[in-house]
Image (cartoon, rainbow, N blue to C red):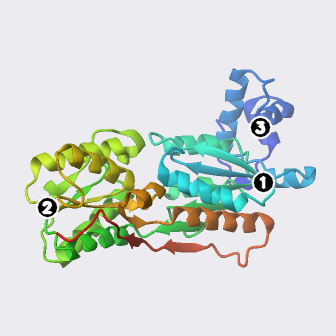
Amino acid sequence: MAQENSDQSKTTIYDVAEEAGVAISTVSRVLNNSRDVSDATRDTVLEAIRELKFRPNRTAKNLAQRSTPTIAVAVPTFTTPFHNELLKGVRSCLDDAEVDLLLCDLDWEAPKATLHNFLARGAMDGLLLAGLPIDEEIGQELKTLGAPIVLIGAQWDEMDSFYWEEKAGARLATEHLLEQGHERIGVITTPHKNRLRNARILGYKEALEEAGRPFEKDLIAYGKTKKHDGFSEEAGYEAMQALLQRTEGVSAVFASSDVQAIGAWQAIREAGKDVPDDFSLVGYDDIKVSRFIGLSSVAQNMHDVGEDATAVLLDRLQGTAASDEPVQRVVRPELKARKSSQPR
């Protein structure tokens, strides 16, 4: 078992080799993902790296070898429209930059463990980390990376952060429906009580209460499909079916994501009703398809955020940042009203 290392930044490849009981050349082969290492030896070396919290100084290595720097982007998934828009912004900023791009799927089920294993490989010069709430444990581990990090969708005082006003966005959507004369407004969300869900439900609740309308827990619905943490068309479809069965007098629905709203729209059609004649519908994210089908939505400008966050990371890598102070940027939500939400 490794002893507590009081200064992780001074941990060297020699320490890892000693801890694992292997030659330095073996540690080097593991770090470079060489196939010339047995699985058992690789596991032993990776365990030593985790124990010692070793982070290879890849930036110095690249400068010495004049190699291309590598930027990693870690997101919960690559397959949702929200994250696709974000990645398009990243790619747009990198069009003229001489960098390699690594992608890490954090996995909705075990994002912390996936991130830990990814960081242990030390194969990056800079990291864009999106969609993972940062606590003290993760914050301290990220600091051992020894490379620039930009957070997207989370805030940490010691790191560059781009994050959204989730509560304010939900208030915008709910206030829009209230202003159109809707009195009972259903809300579609995820069953998991995470930071994002809680903030959006709170914004919905505050908007209702300020308008003198009661907050009814029976009007909160979510689907059974677990894909994408409940932010999917299938989950929205299932949630709308539940709202149709158990509520009376509901004339509008606020969905916590556009994909949920699209699923809800289909459930409304199958019930023989129309949007917006029978139900007004507002989503969240303002993904590209929403603009073409006329879905009202709360815009998060994911493409611009991805582009701006990447620009900050490049400035850090190139030493051209205007200040050493972490960038803290709050992204203001905007309501995009379209044909799916009309006066009652």
Q: Nearer the viewer, mark 3 or mark 2?
A: 2
Residue for point 24% across, 68% down? 342
Badge 2: few (under 14), some or many (20 or more) residues near its Cα, within 10 Å? Answer: few
| Labels 2 and 1: the sequence-earlier one | 1
For the question of whether residue 148 can be seen, the reply is no
42 vs 174, left or right, is right
Using the numbered discs, state the Cα–Cα distance from disc 3 to disc 1 in whole angstroms: 20 Å
The numbered mark at residue 99 is: 1
Residue designated by label 3: 31
For the question of whether residue 293 can be seen, the reply is yes
| Labels 3 and 2: the sequence-earlier one | 3
Q: Nearer the viewer, mark 3 or mark 1?
A: 1
Q: Is 297 or 210 nearer to us in this picture?
A: 297
| Labels 3 and 1: the sequence-earlier one | 3
Query: Please, what is the three-letter code of the amino acid marked with disc 1?
Result: Val
118 vs 221, left or right, is right
Q: Is 47 or 39 nearer to us in this picture?
A: 39
Residue 27 lies, with reference to residue 180, above or below; the image says: above
Residue 149: quadrant of the picture: bottom right
Q: Position of residue 15 (x, y in %)?
A: 78, 41
Q: Is 99 or 16 nearer to us in this picture?
A: 99
Query: Please, what is the three-letter code of the amino acid marked with disc 2?
Result: Glu
Query: For the residue labelled by badge 2, is the local secondary structure a helix, a strand or a loop?
Result: loop
Q: Position of residue 337 (x, y in %)?
A: 35, 70
Q: Quadrant of the N terminus?
A: top right
Residue designated by label 2: 216
Residue for point 73% across, 31% down? 20
